[in-house]
């Protein structure tokens, strides 16, 4: 079967790294790619950062590969995540041999709730001077992300930590933690809970003590970016936005306007996102082949400037293809 | 003039570290100390973690020195912060010669909004399964923290970064960022704004690029704890909760039940909080003397176990007093 993959390079380095991931996927498997527009460029032309056609492609393709968007990022990526019905944002952050990392032993996977929290998007201007945002936590979404997280941890043999701030957000994060506890019981699984502030300290100092970290939406956003700093930077972090039937894959980094167009963007995060895409499509061998090639290139070089090297995006692409 | 300092050791290692700070203050200056109860222990006895008398002491003393509280922490520290009218939580995080740090060049000061954001405390159970929290951002509080932050940065010669998540929380964090921008203009000061997730990565990798970081309440909580990890741990981070007339000083760490009662708690964060207290009381010389003693002890030892040493709290106290 040939799976249909919607490809949305977007803005900035998205245009440079996504084609590398497409080449790599094309090399290992039989996929049908169709490219779609989104981001600042299309917004300038049409007034809309996310064309209806692009959204529909995400809703109907077997999987979607996204690069990055600039100023319009939130207006592109949040609707795209919901277009694939994503409830779980999975963000592995691990160190690799050959890459300078503050913590060469870090091997973390953030499992981030992907539909609610402060991302529910309900804000009000009560007066000129007073504005509010309604943070939403529900039992079904908390249950779904906990189930996903415990399943993932069992399958990949990780410990589970549940991040929260229930000492201040007693009812909302209280529900998140309580629900995770019930799911742990149902799964007969061990887990720890940890305040997200204390967890931030401890992740920086002792990341090897952690495995899967199940997080409310914004906590997952911040803690996974923190973890990127531990393993060598955002250029290495892939992510999967998983829904019940479809999913969207994207590097954790943004459009990096400072280096866009220079041909030196690191495509590894996007290529690793493509590997997660293969896994989602139950093409485990293809996923494994991509990961092995990535690990070899990271170990032996070449490396892009963000990793201390001098290679171009094209040289990384060639190095990867040569290993496949 | 003899200033009145309310002393609230609280729970766990609060009972061990606060007396050290009191000895140090007593050595350098002329203060009148009165001790008050708060925390889990008094809650067990009376049902209330924060006795009326303790709250009133914070409301009326020239300054308050707080240690830590256990499970009841939020119900103790949040009312105490508001009892002193605190709007700014100041959290310096710097590396010290003699202490292993991931980033020996880090010298950061988090200026955290201390009254609103998700700490406004408004939660609702809409149904059994749906709960909300109302996050509040106001112009006056945003202005007050920005003014404090820019003044502090000018006085101590730091650059300013404003942390936010306005791409998702467009109206609320939008107001926070916009107000900070107006204050910057009024002060004729430069500043940068940065998304808190990208900032988390960059603080972990390049903390020396930052100085004062002005933050909404929860962002300040998490990012300052992250920074603790960069400089050697929470045992080194003091904080000041500043109000227009009064202030409360406390270590950033908690009650550390795992090591409480063993006599090995690190008192440095609390002693540095006492130095911030002297500064607030316009006793700059006393503040300087305490900081110099701390830096000498950190450079030469002894060190408590959290810093890789074997010293007891008492040995640190003696070493500090010997230098004063
Ligand atoms: C662009 C933004 C809306 C997004 C988020 O906050 O989820 C980004 O930071 C990310 O983590 O992918
Ligand atoms: C105990 C808790 C309410 C508190 C906070 O979130 O402010 C603590 O984490 C801190 O940072 O002092």
Image (tube, coloured by chain):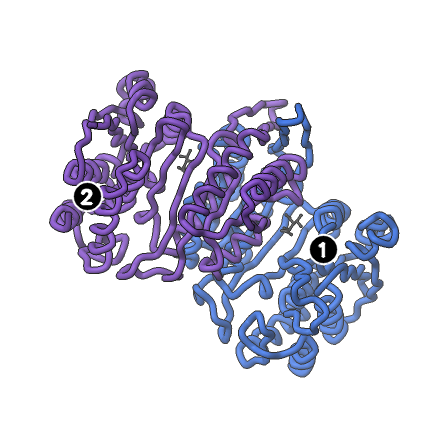
Chain colours: A blue, B purple
Q: Mark 2: which secondary structure?
A: loop
| Residue visible at 17% across and 48% down in the picture | B320
Image quadrant holding the N terminus of chain A, namely: bottom right
Residue A141 point in image, percent of width and height: 63, 38
Q: Which residue is nearer to you in this view: B198 or A318? A: B198
One can see residue B108 in this view: yes
Q: Residues within 10 Å of mark 1 (few under 14, many from 20)?
A: many
| Residue visible at 66% across and 58% down in the picture | A254
For mark 1, what is the residue?
A: A70
Is the distance from the Cβ of mark 2 to the nearest ligand 2 atom less than 8 Å? no
Which numbered mark, 1 or 2, is in the foreground of this view?
1
For mark 2, what is the residue?
A: B262
Decide if residue B102 is on the left or right side of residue B130. left
Looking at the rendered structure, whether the residues under marks 1 and 2 are on a common chain is answered as: no
Above or below, comparing residue A52 to residue B31 in the picture: below
Is the distance from the Cβ of mark 1 to the nearest ligand 1 atom less than 8 Å? no
Residue B286 point in image, percent of width and height: 22, 42
Image quadrant holding the C terminus of chain A, namely: bottom right
Q: Mark 1: which secondary structure?
A: loop
Distance between the alpha carbons at the discs numbered 1 and 2: 53 Å
Q: Which residue is nearer to you in this view: A303 or A256? A: A256
One can see residue A175 in this view: no
Decide if residue B167 is on the left or right side of residue B77. right
Above or below, comparing residue B188 to residue B114 in the picture: below
Q: Which residue is nearer to you in this view: A284 or A262? A: A262
Q: Quadrant of residue B295?
A: bottom left
Do callouts 1 and 2 mark residues in contact (Cβ within 8 Å)?
A: no
Above or below, comparing residue B171 to residue A261 in the picture: above
| Residue visible at 18% across and 36% down in the picture | B29
Q: Quadrant of residue A17?
A: bottom right
Chain letter of mark 1 equals A
Q: Quadrant of residue B309?
A: bottom left
């Amino acid at each position: 079967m040939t799976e249909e993959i919607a490809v949305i390079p977007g803005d900035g380095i998205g245009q440079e790294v996504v084609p590398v991931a497409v080449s790599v996927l094309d090399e290992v498997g039989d996929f049908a790619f169709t490219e779609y527009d989104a981001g600042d460029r299309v917004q300038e032309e049409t007034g809309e950062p996310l064309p209806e056609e692009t959204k529909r492609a995400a809703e109907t393709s077997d999987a979607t590969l996204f690069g990055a968007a600039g100023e319009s990022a939130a207006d592109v990526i949040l609707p795209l995540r919901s277009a694939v019905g994503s409830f779980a944002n999975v963000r592995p952050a691990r160190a690799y041999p050959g890459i300078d990392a503050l913590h060469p032993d870090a091997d973390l996977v953030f499992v981030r709730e992907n539909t609610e929290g402060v991302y529910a998007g309900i804000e009000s201007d009560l007066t000129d001077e007073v504005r509010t945002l309604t943070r939403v936590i529900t039992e079904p979404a908390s249950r779904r992300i906990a189930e996903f997280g415990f399943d993932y941890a069992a399958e990949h043999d990780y410990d589970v930590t549940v991040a929260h701030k229930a000492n201040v957000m007693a009812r909302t994060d209280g529900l998140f933690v309580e629900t995770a506890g019930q799911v742990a019981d149902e799964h007969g699984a061990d887990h720890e809970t940890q305040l997200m502030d204390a967890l931030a300290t401890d992740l920086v100092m002792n990341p090897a003590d952690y495995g899967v970290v199940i997080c409310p939406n914004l906590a997952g956003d911040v803690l996974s970016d923190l973890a990127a700093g531990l393993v060598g930077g955002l250029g290495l972090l892939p992510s999967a936005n998983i829904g019940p039937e479809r999913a969207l894959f994207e590097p954790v980094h943004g459009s990096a306007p400072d280096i866009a167009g220079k041909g030196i963007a690191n495509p590894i995060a996007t290529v690793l996102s493509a590997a997660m895409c293969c896994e989602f499509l139950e093409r485990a061998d293809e996923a494994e082949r991509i990961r092995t090639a990535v690990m070899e290139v990271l170990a032996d070089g070449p490396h892009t400037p963000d990793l201390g090297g001098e290679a171009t995006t094209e040289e990384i692409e060639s190095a990867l293809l040569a290993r496949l």
